[in-house]
Image (tube, rainbow, N blue to C red):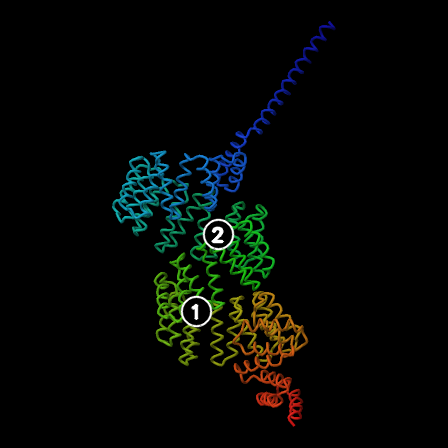
Amino acid sequence: MVCEGSLQSLSKTSVSFVSAMTLFLALILTALSLTGCTRNPAVAKKRYFDRGTAYLQENKTREASIEFQNAIQIDPKYAAAHYELAQCFLRERDVLHAFQELARATEFDPADWKAQVEIAKMFLAAGKLPDALDRVEKVLKGDPQNISAQILLSRIDVASGKAATAVTDAEHAVHMAPSSPEGYLNLAVILDHNKDLPGAEKNFKKAAEVAPKNSGPALALAQFYETQKRWDDSEKEFQTAIAVDPKNALPRAELAQMYLSEGQKDSAATVLIDAKKALPDNPSAYRMLGDFYIAVGQNDKALSEFASLHSQHPNDSAVAKSYAELLITRKKLDEAGRINDEILKKNPSDPVALTYRGQILEMQGKPQNAIPILQGVAKDNPSYAPGFYFLGSAYAATGDYTQAQANWKKAVQLRPQMIDAQRALASLAIRNRDFENLSSVASQIIKYAPGVPEGYLLHARALVSQGNIAGAEADLNKAIQVAPQNATGYAGLGDLRLAQKRLDEAEKYYRDALDRDPASSDALRGLVNVELLRKQPAKALTLVNAQIARVPNSGNFYQLLGEVELKNQDPAAAQAAFEKSTQLDHNNVQSFLGVASLQMAHGSIDAAIGEYANALQANPRDVEIYLALGEAYEMQKQWQKAEEQYQKALQINPGYALAANNLAYLMLEHGGDLSVAFNLAQTARKGLPDLPNSADTLGWAYYHQGLYSAAAGLFETAIKGNSKNPTFHYHLGMAYDRENNPVMARKEFEYTLQIDPEYAQAGEIHKLLATSTAKSN
């Protein structure tokens, strides 16, 4: 019994042991199998490729590109991975790298017809027709039934000016695949190009007939009707496309765009609201309404819409970026920074969000902090134009216009149609009075935005400076032609007529501008100038008040009202108008300066200083305010505080000549570093070559260095510009005195006192006169 029990026990133990060993061996074999997979390059590269394909289907292009690159690292000749990596680059709009990858795909697999066709398309887009034709013929030789290549052949014919051959080749594509809509659509486009509208319409309809469940043909037919302004037919086809493919956002977007072309903004908005409701989980659909509000300039609605979207879709980075950008545009920088930090927390290297961070810092008055961030964006993303544009803006904020121009040029080199960068270059050309360059930049704006009046206006300005009035007038008329409801062209023609003293015509154009845009401050200012030239300041005042009644919340209008009230000798009313302007627009620096200047005129310097402080809260980087504040402190003889304000202005803009001039003079007068003062005086003279004060300041710097002859020459230049300034004569007298020319010194000292008997240095002058008399005797 004992033995039997022992055997049973052993039997159970043996079974358990065998089961355990079996499981152990299975695990070992599995591990070995997995290890073998990992060590097998073919399996590994296929796994990377499949992951990349899955990411690409989810539109995660960055993740997909990493997987395809991993596959290529294992097998550099993996043609399929090169092709898919090219698709990632194409989605990122990186055409150069896409082309390189497609070239590698065809190098390692010449029979990769899809890659060959893609390269042919790129050659066609670049205008390299022989290269495109060579690739297409290679594909058709290897794959005679390749409809994509045949369609591309017909498009090369069109680009080559072979209209009849294009139709023949397009018809052949139709015969190759009569049940496919692609051939019919291509033939329709070519016939439309050849002005055969009935033939085009027939083939668009045929495409829809062979593919009734495909929204593409209906969409193409709708667009065809839209170009002919057959609005009802177009609307019908767009609705068909929506019905055929209700989950596709594109037909809804196109329908909204058609309504917008007709001027039916409300109908367009309704379509997009419906799209958002019908496709609540489709990012393309729910973003469209906010983008529409931005496009039509309804920024308040856009901000509200994207705020709502961000709360509903907190993980949608595109929504977060649009929301942050709108907040930046509205100068809500703290909130913009918070939203942007959320984006960067999820993706610290996101170039768009990093660019926003730099932009926010620059707008907060910290361009020196913005520059390293934006330099990093430019270095890591050398094809990202906005990074260079905002880096240029940060440099401009520090006064480094050389670096600003270099980066703006890089931005337009990468993206010539980037109008903000072109506009920045135009502003710099105007600042430098480089009208030849302004003309060139304006031409680029016209080329890439021919329907926008701005390019024509800038070009006109360049031509006026060159004396080409007829050319400028032609540009201004073109601006009106492309945008007849835009006020700027009419205001520009008004300015031209005003300069020609053709006041009646100028008045007409300014009124035309105000009819189109009642808030146009340029047009109203032009009308005011017309009346002032007619010696009618009271009428000018009536005009401004009448326009304020139409547009009661314009800070610019109240600023203009203040200026006109001054012309009408009513400083109290002027001050009230300037104060109203600052209440409506905290960024209207000129109105702050207007209030403060009136307070100073009444001897209320402390009140003026308070006004400047208020202005700086809203405009911390406006150098004009620091300059005015420094001058106010000078009136109080608070020399150190005055120097501090000029230094702050120069920290923001090291080339600001007025601040350099004032600071140099203070340092010379009150014991500052002579070498620093001399450099500042040179900066002032270079920046303000026609200003008598800059000549006097540089002369005074020479005087303090013992260079009396050079100083005298500059003082004489200053006097030529303003012969009634006692300081200029006093300084010239001092230079003559040091040159041991008592006769000329006496003449200048006497003239100084003749101009101003109470001159601040009168006591010193009397002593010097006595000395010069003694020397003369």
Tell me where residue 627 sits by quadrant: bottom right
Residue sticking out furthest to the top: 1
Image position of 310 (left or right of 110): right
Q: Is residue 672 above or below residue 284?
A: below
Image position of 6 (left or right of 91): right
Pick whichever, 247 or 450, lies toward us. Answer: 450
Q: Secondary structure at mark 2?
A: helix
Q: Is residue 472 above or below residue 136?
A: below
The residue lying at 26 percent from left, 43 percent from top is: 202
Three-letter residue code for mark 2: Glu
- Percent x, y of residue 218: 33, 43
Using the image, tell me which numbered label, if any, was put on residue 192.
none
Q: Classify the position of the N terminus by image quarter.
A: top right
- Percent x, y of residue 712: 59, 82
Disc 1 marks which residue?
A: 522
Tell me where residue 440 sits by quadrant: bottom left
Q: Count all numbered tags in the image, as a single digit.
A: 2
- Percent x, y of residue 519: 43, 66
Pick whichever, 742 or 442, lies toward us. Answer: 742
Q: Secondary structure at mark 1?
A: helix
Tell me where residue 103 sits by quadrant: top left
Disc 2 marks which residue?
A: 305
Q: Earlier in the sequence, mark 1 or mark 2?
A: 2
Pick whichever, 433 or 623, lies toward us. Answer: 433
* Within-10-Å neighbours for mark 2: few <14, some 14–19, many 20+: some
